[in-house]
């Protein structure tokens, strides 16, 4: 009898233990999904998330990117129907703020240490006007002009310091039978984001200039903006043959295959410059003679958590880890080349080209992309007005003045200070 | 006697039961959504819930708001051009191919038929991407060939010039779908009784006269069906622009069709912010439906003018149009 | 009188020339796709239509190794097979019911289905999106199945109705006398008699369902739930594009349909166009 009881008790205990173990493992193993528009970064992000998983074996974060043009719409649809990812890339400024206002992003202002690692300025792109953060700042990108160093040497061209020098260099390259500038218009966004908004701060006087427009102290069709459109017009004849139909990827290929000598683009593109057959480097967009030069250093992605996630604590654990001192080195080294960590505790960039890019933004005053902070989300969006204007000017459909007028009139429809 | 009474007893409820699964799925996922989408064109709301009745406001914005109406009328006009070129190119070539293939004793008919029809079976997205590569101004095959044969001046940025872009994507669409009219005309030609040709030949009518006097009149119903098919397909086209140009219909909205405009307004929202205006989208869909309905009705009138027939003769071609939707 | 084939046709060489040129035009893009899928990234730009100088299998390798494409492929297969099966089952049941039910209601039901032939289902996208959200099917592969079934039913009912109506009454009469119920008659007699019509309906729906972009695009985002065609759009990353990889995927995505088509070209062409000229 005794034996029997003992056996029964043992069996019971074992069963309980097994059950608990099962329950524990079922409970503790949490899989979080992370939405992103960075379809190109699967490898690097998997590495980063793997490092997190090593530290927290019970939390696995799965990287699940969408292709970029669909990201904003798809994300909103998912969040609205309650099936959004637990963690997700958040666009800076307006696009992100809208989702925060609609209650989809959780408020992360009170995450311990956040304010220590990120200054108010660094947090601002992912915060509403009251200063509440809806995402942990993650990466910034920079912009510049890539150039073929070998070709410049061969033709005896120095890195242009002014816009006038730049145009002269273009002429010289073109005379030598090489396309000076690789950029095209087919994908639309690139001519806007990496060319126009790359050079624009030089013409309007950087952040200070931008703030004047945003405050209504300057009109969007003033001489400075017209000059920037004019510069785009000057650029057009130096673009490749058929540039109207060249996609972003075509431009990249033209530069890589040495068919074009220069290429306006963002720092992220470096990641695609593997096994290059020539020496290349980058210079800051040259300002018009007598003006100060700026670099567009743009807050690109933050990481937000879903306000309705089933695993708020795990999400917070991840976000805190992301900017913790111990993760700083891992983050700096595993975020894709050409993206720059924003955290104040970030480690030094090891890639030489990337570091050169970063130094460029340290030796120049910087600003963000012109339309991002305020002009994005009305109808018509400043983004689209600028984009349409640049394309119309470059294809000769509009004068720079007319394009600037359209920008002013379009914004005046909804942006109060522009009226 | 026994059996027929049994049939009568089984009528009604039982047969309805047979039709029920199909009826339910069809009603819930097609009939109701289509009607409901029209109803929703009178509502607005935030995001995906539309609960605020606004009367004709969405239509007012569609037709009168300077920003929106400019886009709408541009897309509407482009779709008609898309349809016009397709009618002219795709269906004329289709008729020509059918005439050649239907020739008595034409060798290789089977092989050519199979080849002409291949693109119909492929995804528009796939063929669109490939044609985009071929039309690339820098390394696309077309411009390289043009340059090699001394027509370098004709090497254009086909997809980037507002003058050519719409024509270029329309021709790709024609290339893809020409197999359908070819086969339909072929089937029509093969049903024309042999004696009619013989009679015409005895009368001394040449190839052209036989075509004009005998074949064409007898083919008219097929012409009508092919036209309706093209019409319905073209007003729903989306993939070809999405693959070759993107959902914005660049350059400067030159390739924006009703399909892409609907996608941007009602489903995805305008890049870069991406907040859809579903009520407005529903209005776009309703207008598309109205145009289709009027067009199909008109074609039906023209074709069945003599005898009043029901929906059936028109039914099939519309279904064919689904292939491209 | 001479048979028409004996009449000399001076245009004949031109006819063959024209058709041969068109055939070239059909094959050229396919050639471009397949040939370039074996090239190295930069060779595509330097020589876009010659044979590859060096074979690069990396494009294909990335498709099979540690990539979501096999998953996309299975999703597409699931969607296509399930949709077709349901269309055939529901469609034939409904058509049979409508034929046998001699009443004006059945005629109405039939016309209700037939009316769907003239309406493209895309018109209902706005509401369909809301329905999927309510049903909790959004972002799931299976969300597109009911839509495809609804889309395929009108043509199925229309085609099968005509076919079943043409079945001589004696064939089912005998079974009726033997005491077989309607369901038994349907499963043992009707289904085998309408097989050719079922094949037509299946082929008719197969191509548009396999190739559809619209509904996956608006319903599905999540990686694991994508169909093949939707997955293809993901190949164009934000910042870089590897054409050899893209073309490898495009080539593979065409393979199933091309194989089916080439083995049954006649049925495909007839299935997709027959009856269209009936009216």
Image (cartoon, coloured by chain):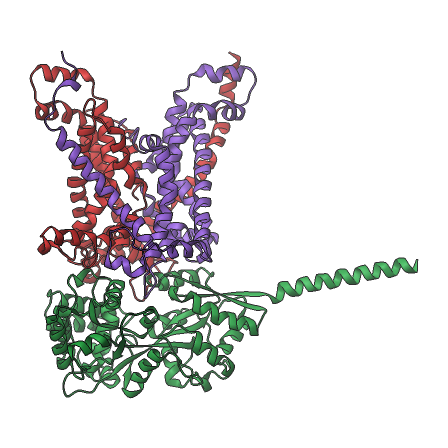
- Rendering coords of residue C264 (x, y %): 36, 32
Residue located 84% across and 58% down the image: A8
- Rendering coords of residue C85 (x, y %): 46, 37
Q: Nearer the viewer, residue B98 or C12?
A: C12
Colour seen for chain C: purple
- Rendering coords of residue B203 (x, y %): 7, 15
Report the chain shown in green. A
Q: Quadrant of the C terminus of chain A?
A: bottom left
Q: Is residue B4 above or below residue C82?
A: above
Q: Quadrant of the N terminus of chain A?
A: bottom right
- Rendering coords of residue B188 (x, y %): 22, 26
Report the residue that reaches farthest toward the front: C53
Report the chain shown in red. B
Report the residue that reaches farthest toward the right: A1
Q: Nearer the viewer, residue A297 or C21?
A: C21
**Which image quadrant for residue A310?**
bottom right
Residue C123 appearing in the image:
yes
**Which image quadrant for residue A4?**
bottom right
């Amino acid at each position: 009898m005794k034996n029997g009881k003992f056996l029964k008790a043992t069996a019971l205990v074992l069963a309980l233990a097994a059950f608990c173990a099962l329950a524990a493992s079922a409970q503790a193993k949490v899989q979080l999904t992370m939405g992103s528009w960075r379809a190109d970064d699967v490898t690097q992000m998997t590495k980063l998330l793997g490092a997190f998983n090593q530290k927290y074996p019970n939390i696995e974060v799965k990287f699940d990117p969408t292709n970029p043009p669909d990201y904003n719409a798809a994300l909103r649809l998912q969040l609205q129907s309650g099936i959004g990812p637990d963690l997700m890339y958040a666009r800076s400024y307006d696009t992100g703020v809208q989702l925060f206002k609609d209650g989809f992003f959780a408020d992360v202002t009170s995450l311990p240490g956040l304010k220590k690692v990120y200054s108010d300025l660094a947090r601002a792109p992912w915060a509403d006007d009251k200063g509440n953060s809806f995402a942990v700042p993650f990466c910034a990108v920079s912009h510049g002009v890539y150039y073929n160093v070998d070709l410049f040497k061969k033709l005896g061209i120095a890195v242009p310091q002014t816009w006038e020098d730049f145009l002269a260099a273009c002429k010289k390259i073109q005379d030598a039978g090489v396309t000076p500038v690789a950029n095209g218009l087919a994908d639309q966004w690139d001519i806007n984001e990496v060319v126009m908004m790359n050079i624009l701060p030089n013409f309007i006087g950087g952040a200070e200039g931008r703030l004047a427009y945003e405050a209504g102290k300057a009109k969007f069709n003033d001489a400075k903006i017209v000059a920037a459109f004019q510069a785009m017009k000057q650029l057009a004849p130096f673009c490749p043959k058929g540039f109207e139909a060249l996609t972003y990827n075509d431009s990249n290929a033209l530069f890589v295959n040495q068919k074009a000598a220069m290429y306006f683009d963002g720092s992220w593109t470096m990641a695609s410059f593997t096994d290059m057959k020539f020496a290349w480097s980058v210079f800051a967009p040259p300002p018009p003679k007598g003006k100060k030069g700026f670099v567009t250093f743009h807050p690109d992605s933050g990481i937000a958590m879903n306000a309705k996630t089933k695993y708020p604590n795990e999400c917070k654990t991840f976000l805190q880890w992301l900017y913790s001192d111990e993760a700083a080195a891992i983050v700096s080294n595993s975020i894709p080349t050409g993206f720059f960590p924003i955290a104040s505790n970030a480690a030094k960039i090891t890639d030489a080209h990337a570091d050169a890019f970063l130094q460029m933004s340290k030796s120049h005053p910087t600003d963000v992309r012109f339309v991002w902070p305020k002009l994005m989300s009305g109808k018509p969006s400043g983004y689209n007005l600028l984009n349409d204007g640049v394309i119309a000017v470059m294809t000769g459909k509009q004068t720079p003045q007319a394009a600037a007028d359209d920008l002013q009139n379009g914004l005046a429809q909804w942006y109060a200070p522009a009226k | 006697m026994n059996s027929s009474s049994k049939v009568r007893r089984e009528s009604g409820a039982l047969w309805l039961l047979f039709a029920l699964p199909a009826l339910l799925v069809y009603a819930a996922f097609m009939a109701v959504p289509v009607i409901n989408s029209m109803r929703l064109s009178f509502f607005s709301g935030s995001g995906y819930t539309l609960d605020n009745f606004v009367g004709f406001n969405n239509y007012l914005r569609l037709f009168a708001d300077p920003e929106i109406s400019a886009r709408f009328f541009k897309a509407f006009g482009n779709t008609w051009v898309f349809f016009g070129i397709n009618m002219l190119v795709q269906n004329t070539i289709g008729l020509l191919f059918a005439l050649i293939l239907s020739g008595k004793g034409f060798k290789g008919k089977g092989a050519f038929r199979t080849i002409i029809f291949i693109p119909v079976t492929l995804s528009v997205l796939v063929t669109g991407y490939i044609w985009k590569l071929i039309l690339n101004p820098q390394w696309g095959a077309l411009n390289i060939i043009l340059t090699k044969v001394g027509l370098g001046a004709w090497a254009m940025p086909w997809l980037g010039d507002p003058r050519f872009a719409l024509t270029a994507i329309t021709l790709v669409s024609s290339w893809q779908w020409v197999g359908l009219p070819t086969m339909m005309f072929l089937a029509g030609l093969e049903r024309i009784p042999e004696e009619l040709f013989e009679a015409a030949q005895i009368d001394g009518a040449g190839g052209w006269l036989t075509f004009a006097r005998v074949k064409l009149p007898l083919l008219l119903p097929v012409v009508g069906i092919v036209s309706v098919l093209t019409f319905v397909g073209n007003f729903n086209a989306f993939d070809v622009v999405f693959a070759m140009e993107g959902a914005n219909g660049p350059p400067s909205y030159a390739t924006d069709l009703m399909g892409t405009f609907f996608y941007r307004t009602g489903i995805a929202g305008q890049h870069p912010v991406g907040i859809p205006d579903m009520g407005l989208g529903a209005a776009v869909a309703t207008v598309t439906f109205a145009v289709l309905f009027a067009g199909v009705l008109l074609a039906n009138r023209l074709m069945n003018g003599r005898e009043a027939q029901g929906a059936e003769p028109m039914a099939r071609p519309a279904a064919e149009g689904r292939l491209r939707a | 009188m001479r048979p028409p084939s004996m009449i000399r046709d001076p245009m004949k060489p031109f006819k063959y020339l024209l058709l041969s040129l068109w055939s070239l035009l059909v094959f050229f893009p396919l050639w471009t796709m397949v040939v370039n899928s074996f090239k190295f990234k930069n060779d595509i730009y330097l020589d876009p239509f010659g044979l590859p100088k060096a074979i690069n299998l990396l494009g294909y390798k990335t498709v099979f190794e540690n990539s979501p494409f096999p998953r996309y492929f299975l999703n597409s297969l699931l969607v296509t097979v399930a949709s077709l099966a349901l269309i055939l089952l529901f469609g034939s049941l409904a058509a049979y019911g409508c034929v046998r039910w001699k009443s004006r209601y059945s005629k109405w039901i039939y016309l209700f289905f037939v009316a769907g032939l003239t309406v493209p289902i895309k018109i209902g996208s706005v509401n369909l999106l809301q329905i999927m959200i309510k049903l909790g099917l959004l972002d799931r592969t299976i969300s597109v199945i009911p839509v495809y079934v609804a889309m395929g039913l009108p043509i199925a009912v229309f085609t099968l109705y005509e076919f079943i109506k043409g079945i001589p009454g004696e064939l089912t009469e005998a079974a009726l006398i033997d005491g077989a119920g309607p369901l038994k008659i349907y499963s043992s007699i009707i289904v085998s008699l309408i097989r050719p019509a079922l094949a037509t309906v299946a082929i008719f729906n197969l191509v548009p369902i396999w190739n559809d972009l619209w509904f996956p695009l608006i319903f599905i985002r999540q990686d694991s739930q994508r169909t093949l065609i939707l997955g293809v759009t993901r190949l164009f990353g934000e910042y870089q594009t590897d054409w050899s990889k893209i073309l490898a995927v495009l080539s593979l995505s065409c393979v199933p349909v091309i194989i089916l088509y080439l083995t049954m070209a006649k049925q495909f062409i007839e299935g997709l166009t027959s009856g269209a000229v009936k009216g």
